Structure formats: C-alpha cells, structure tokens
Image (cartoon, grey):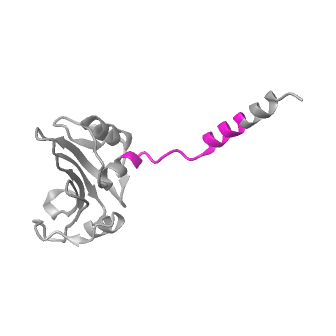
Amino acid sequence: MNTRLPTLLLALAASAAASAAPAAKPTAALEALLACRAGSDFTQAQAEDALRAAGLTQVPGGVFEAKEGKVALFGGSVDSANVSIGPSGSKSLHVYLNDVSAPQVGRSLSVTTVNEAADSEAPSFVRKLDARHTLHVGAADDYEGYSASVSCLILP
C-alpha cells in the first residue's frame, strides 16, 4: 500500500479544517491590548497595527477613526482612538466609544472599582493590575462627543 496517500489525505483534511475555522475577529488584537494585562507591553507600531486591523483609519493629528462603517467594540462603536508613547517610556492606548455606557464597558472588562478621582458626572472606573498597568473605563459628559472610553496605561 502506498504510504504517501494517507499522509496526503491527512494534510488535505487539516488544510480544509483550518480554512473552515472562523476568522479571528478584526478587533481581537485591539481588545487584547486594551485588556491591559499585567506584564503586557506594546510598541507604537503594534498598537497602530491593531487599530488598523480593527478597521480604523489614521487621520491627521495621529488620531484613528472609523471611516468605512462602524467598528463594534465592547458593546458600542468606536468613535476614535489614539496611542501615545512618551519620552520616559510611559504608554497609553485610548479608545472612545459611542452607544455604550461606562458601567457596561466596565462590566465587560471586569473593571468595577469607581474612580473617585475622575472628573465626570457619571461614574468612571479604574483597575490597577500591577505596579505598571492600569485600566481605565471613563464616562463621558454629553458635550464630549462620545459615551465611554477605555484606556490602558503602562508606566516605564
């Protein structure tokens, strides 16, 4: 019996299974960065690639916006986003959302501690993951143009 045939059939079956698997969500990389897990890190390029993969387009000023339809994230839609890496090595990734409240986003990210220092009318939330990583879920006021925000802050 030819031993190449079973090997070829197995390879074809594996290939078919891989192509039948659902594609990863376009926002998966962005969601992973925004989860701000202890010990995680990102470069400017990695964050910008995640924003682009999610369907956001960079506009003048370094801000990213959804130009080709809505980008769904954490139960809302992305209004805008930006990434910043300071000279000291501090890093931040911010996403501003519409059509979702800060408490809803906070629950989806397990961020439930009210941020008493936040300057917002509605509750904002904060979760310190370790000495370097802090996840913020902010509530926006009506005049700000978005309803909630998510920020991953990483100190050097």
Residue lying at 38% horizontally and 40% vertically, measured from the top left: 53
Whether 95 is drawn above or below 47: the answer is below
Tell which of 53 and 97 is nearer to you: 53
Residue placed farthest to the right in the image?
1
- For the point 11% across and 41% down, which residue is it? 88
The magenta stretch is 11-29
Residue 41, given in percent of the width and then of the height, sits at 28, 45
Q: Residue at left 36%, top 55%?
A: 73
Q: Is residue 108 left or right of residue 101?
A: right
Where is residue 112 shown, x and y percent of the image? 27, 71
Examine the residues drawn in magenta and state their main secondary structure. Answer: helix
Q: Is residue 37 left or right of residue 139?
A: right
**Tally of marks:** 0
Report the side of 118 relative to 103 (left or right). left
Residue 115 in the image, given as x and y percentages of width and height: 16, 68
Above/below status of 135 relative to 66: below
Q: In which image quadrant can residue 129 be found?
A: bottom left
Image quadrant occupied by the N terminus = top right
**Left or right relative to 74: residue 119:** left
Picture coordinates of residue 69, whole percent (x, y): 37, 46
Q: Is residue 36 magenta?
A: no
Residue at (38, 53) in percent of width and height: 72
Relative to the observer, which residue lies in front, 14 or 156?
156
